[in-house]
Every structure is written in structure tokens, then in C-alpha cells.
Image (cartoon, helix red, strand yellow):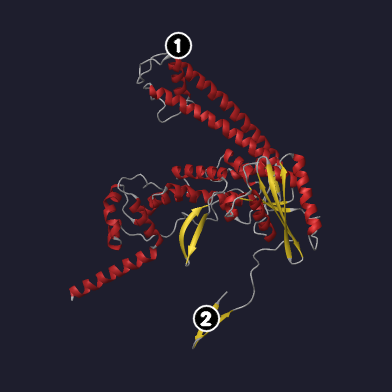
Amino acid sequence: MPIDVTTSGTEVVIRSEGNQGIEVQVLKSYGVGIDCHSQFIAICVHVRNNQRVFKYMSEADTDWDSLVKSKDWVLDTIRKHSNPVPDLRQPLHYVIEATSTYHMLILRAWGGIPSVINPMLAGATKKKTDDLDAERLSFHDLTGVWPESYVPSNDLQELRVLIAERNHYAKLATQCSNRINNIIVRFGITIGRGTSVTKNSEVRAIVEDLASETPSFHENICPDPLPADIKTLIQQEYMLYDKYVVEADSYLSRVRHKVYSMNWETRDGTIPGSEMVRILCTTPGVGEITCFTWLAFVGTPRRFPNAKALAAYCGLDPSLKVSAGHVTSTKKRGGCRTLHAILVTSADRIIRAHSEAFGRLGFLMAKSSGKWKKATNAVGRKLCTAMHQIMLTGREFTYENYTIMKNAAIFDISVDELPMLNSDFKRYVKILHDHDIHTTTDMVTAYLSCSLGGVKGLGRKFFVTMQDFLSHQHKYQNEYKKLHSNSSATTTVEEV
């Protein structure tokens, strides 16, 4: 709110407009904190009794009966020692740190309204013990520091496990392929260069022939025979590769069946899984496996207040440090590593292709900044926002509401005149002419189509200069008019 400070002699008067405060958090009737481990959990309960707060501690084993009884102890403690006694018919709320998968057992046994937090965000005490950790978390619950956490359903948990197994076997298959190529290179066979010795059927047939008892002669391949043990090893790796591919495909089929059998939430209702996958696949660079992973870890778009919150969950929202009104540093939050990986991978794919707007935007950003990772994160964030909107509306992706890369009126002059307006263009005029680019319209068209990305001599500096030309069209027009106005005035004086 605006604050006026005036000085009258030695007296300083401070005036603030309005007295409407901003609600930050709600002080709750009780607080429960849990520090969990594989073998036991430490529990702390804070209860309010009139104007005072009392603390109660307990520990419990992590077998199912002990966890159920520990919740009963918490409810009994709140009931006996609170004044006034809160309404315990409402779901129990508590704060718990995310600890591998151990905290999931407590969520299943206790239910209620949990707030699952990153241990790095909770803030460590100067003296580290399990009881102190639980006490800190209980105080956080009492003061309402953390919002309610989303707890995935059994269907989503099953889907996540199936996807993890599919990725596990796919990774093992890739490792086998890499090992085969690594082995044959040691013996002078470079046929796997630039391709796959497993997925490329022609290359695989040659390698398997070389690993057979009676190998054939192949042109342009090292004629030295492979040792017997190496042949056996290559054959075993191919057998393992085939086995892992079958397993990965089997789990992918289960994932597909699970996704299609479920109904997925939108803003106004639900739609079948097959339809949700179809519309999500209309997003640039997004395929079926990416959609399956997205659905498994997002679950419902309703759990996020906006697309920015979802981008933060995906690790695509930079955390800013601000001092004196200026951003001093930026750092991306960790977020969900699985979602982050699939989004930046999809972004990398469309940037390399740069055949549509998102890809061209990322490609030009990478060229002008010299930072490929920055471009993939920026495009990954746009994919995240687009997929969130698709889930909310239940409609296919479209560029209609985007202003990026749309054709605009370009200040059209000869490229020979550009150095008079910006001397940085001087070194590029000849290169542009050599590639049949003679006007600024030709130059911008080629720039937006990304056809200048591989031109020798047009590096990062050129793309920065191009961005300046596109962003300051009005400035270039004024400079051009001013230049020609002065030229006309000089010509008139000389004629007189």
C-alpha cells in the first residue's frame, strides 16, 4: 500500500493509505508433524489450550497396525488436551516430509489432509534429531505454512509403476545396444557409426554375421575376424536386447490399456482416455509415451491453480532472487524430474526440426543466446502450458491464441542500406547477397523459416542483430526517414 513520509522540523510523519491487511495463513486448532524413516516414525502434536500451546511426542513402528494405532493416539491426544476441542469429524491434517517412498505408507494408513513437503524447503534446525524435525513440522501444521498436498489415486500409482518398469527395460535395451557398438569398435568395426546396431536391421544383420562361426566378407569393414569369446558375448547381448525390448513393449501395452480404461478430468467434466491421448498428441513434438507419462504424473489439471504452478511442478519455472527491486539471480526449482525430462526432450526434438512455430522460436533463441539448454527449457515451458490448456478444455492444440512468429509488417528496404542504420549489419551484406537475399523482407522471411541457421558467417552476433531489427522496427524507420531527409536537404543546398 502507498506510504507517504513527510518531515516537519525534527518530526517525521508516516502516513499509510488504508488498513486492509492481507491474509497470509490461518492459525489452526492443532498441528501434527511426522518425521518418517524405513523402520519407525517420530510424531509431534501441538494442541492449543486456551492461550497456551502444549507439545506431545511419540514414536511408532512402520508396520500397518502400528501406523493405524499411531493415528488413533494423535486423535486421542488432541481430544483430551485441547481447549476448546476441535471438530475431529473433519479429516485429520498433518505435515510430513517426502522421504523416498516411506511417506506414502503413512499417507495410505492415515488418509486425511496431508501436506507433503520437500525436506530442503522445511528448514533444518541447528540441532538435528528426529524429535526436533517432527516438532518443526508440527509447528508448521499448526500455523498453516504449507498447503494441502495432492495424493494420487491407486490407478495413478499403478500407472506410474508400470511406466517406471517400461522405462527400466527400455534403458536396459539401450545399454545392450551401446555395449555391442562399443565392443565391435574395439576390433576396428565402425559400422555402427551414426546409426544403431540393433534398430537398424541391415546393420544388425552384418554384425550378427560377423559374430557367427562362418562370417562373410563385407566391403569397407575390417577383415580381421572377431575372437570366439567376443562373438559369444555379442550374441548374448543381442539376446538380452531382444528380451528387454519384448518386456518394454509388454509394459507399454499395459500402460496404454490402463490409460485408455480411465476417464480423465477436464475443467467441465471428464473424457475417455483414448480421446485425451489423441488431443494431447496434437501438441507439437508430443507423442504417445510422453502423453502417458504426462497423465500419470499430472493426474488432473484441477490440482493446479494455473499453468505457472504446473510449470513450477515440472521444474520449468525459475525462482528469482530480488534485492532492491532488481533480480540478482535465477535458479530453476527441482520439480518433478520425470515430467521435466519428457518436456525438454520433446522441446529438443522440435527445436532441431524447427519446422513449426515453437521449434523455430526455440531455434532462434538458441542461435541468438548461444544457450541450447535455455531454449529447450523455454520451449518445454510452452509445451507444458499448452498441454495444461488442452487438459482443461478438452480441445486440440492450436496456434490461434499465440502471437509468436506471426507475420508482421516489415520495414522493407535493400540490405545494402542496413549498415547506414546499424553498422553491425555491414559484415553480413555480402553473405546475404550470396544467398539471394536482397531486401529486409527476404532477410526476415529467411530468418523466421530458420534457413539462415546453418549459413557460414552468420553466427550469434547476426541473430542478436536480427532480433534488434525485428523488435525496433519503428526506430529503424525513423532513422531511415531522418537520413533521407538530411540527404534531400543537402542536395537542395548544393543545387542552389
Identify whether 14 is placed above or below 253.
below
Task: State the residue at coordinates (46%, 26%).
Answer: 179
Q: Nearer the viewer, residue 32 or 49?
A: 49
352 lies above or below 429: above
Quadrant of image for the N terminus: bottom right
Residue at position x 57%, y 33% in the image: 168
Q: Which of marks 2 and 1 is in front?
A: 2
Residue 350 place in picture, x, y as percent: 48, 44
Q: Which of 160 and 462 is in front in this view?
A: 160
Return the residue found at the far top: 214
Residue kind at label 2, given as amino acid type: Val
**For the view shown, which residue lies furthest in the bottom direction?**
9
Contact, mark 2 vs mark 1 (Cβ under 8 Å): no
Q: Residue 421 sits in which quadrant?
A: bottom left
Can residue 199 be seen by looking at this rendering? no
Indicate which disc, 2 or 1, sits on the residue closer to the N terminus.
Answer: 2
Q: Nearer the viewer, residue 77 or 494?
A: 77
- The count of marks equals 2
Secondary structure state at the residue bearing disc 1 = loop
Q: Provide the residue designation for mark 1.
A: 213
**Picture coordinates of residue 466 (x, y %)?**
36, 56
The residue that label 2 is drawn on is 5
Q: Which numbered circle lies on residue 335? A: none
Q: Distance between the residues labelled 2 and 1?
A: 93 Å
Q: How crowded is mark 2: few (under 14 residues within 10 Å), some or many (20 or more)?
A: few
Mark 1 is surrounded, within 10 Å at the Cα level, by few (under 14), some (14 to 19) or many (20 or more) other residues, namely few
Asked whether, in this view, residue 278 is left or right of residue 220, the answer is: right
* Mark 2 residue element: strand
x%, y% of residue 261?
A: 70, 38
Q: Which residue is depicted at the point 64% across and 65% down? A: 24
Disc 1 marks a residue whose amino acid type is Glu
User: What is the x, y in percent for residue 295?
Assistant: 63, 44
